[in-house]
Image: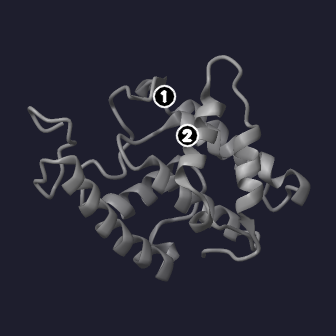
Amino acid sequence: MIPGTSVLANKLGLTTSAELRDAENDLLEARVAELRASPLIVRQTFDAAHLCGLHRQLFQDVYEWAGQLRKVGISRNGESFVPPSNIMQPLSHFAQRIAESNRLADVTEAGLAAEIAYLYDYANYAHPFREGNGRTQREFFDQLLACSGRGLAWDTIDMKRLHEACHQARKEVDSDLGLLEQLFADLLTDDPAY
């Protein structure tokens, strides 16, 4: 954090949340376009290294630590994410499950939304980066689904709905992947982003 503020230290020298958010969005848009034009900029291994590579690609203009696993504990809206020393545990399970499903190609259409919800929840719980987890996950899942000719229509979803579904999945009591599964069922398309 920049001393005396709640703003993350950044390469741009910005000291307000609004300035940083706007700059992040503009720079990210350019880096996503670059990634979509040349997807192999980041090696598609569908594991923690892949997530780190995507994060580095997307946030390299903003943060010195882009692509590095977080070293601090974080929570949002009363939800704690996995402690930094344990980040690799859920990410290893996440990667193993993706590999076992042949990058989701072996998952039936009927089970696909549930599997995506399960994996997305695992990645979200790991929350491997200090900032930019959701945006990195969206690109990761776009690349993953493209392996089997599918995609997610992220532009059709209200982000508040995504956050509510993630919150419901992460609740310590009465957690439920149902909202997240329904969200992915609504987003699935035969039009891959990559």
Which residue position is annotated with label 2?
124
What residue sits 16% from the left and 55% below the top? 11
Instruction: Please provide percent x and percent y for residue 19.
Output: 19, 56
Q: Along the horizontal axis of the image, is 38 left or right of 169?
A: left
- Going by the numbered disc 1, the residue's amino acid type is Phe
**Residue 18 or 125: which is nearer the viewer?**
18
Q: Is mark 2 on a helix, strand or loop?
A: helix
Is 164 placed above or below 145 here? above
- Residue contact at pointers 2 and 1, CB within 8 angstroms: yes
Q: How far apart are marks 2 and 1 (CA)?
A: 8 Å
Q: Along the horizontal axis of the image, is 147 left or right of 36?
A: right
- Going by the numbered disc 2, the residue's amino acid type is Asn
Which residue position is annotated with label 1?
81
Give me the disc on residue 41.
Answer: none
Instruction: Please provide percent x and percent y for residue 3.
Output: 9, 33
Looking at marks 2 and 1 on the same chain, the residue that comes earlier in the sequence is marked by 1
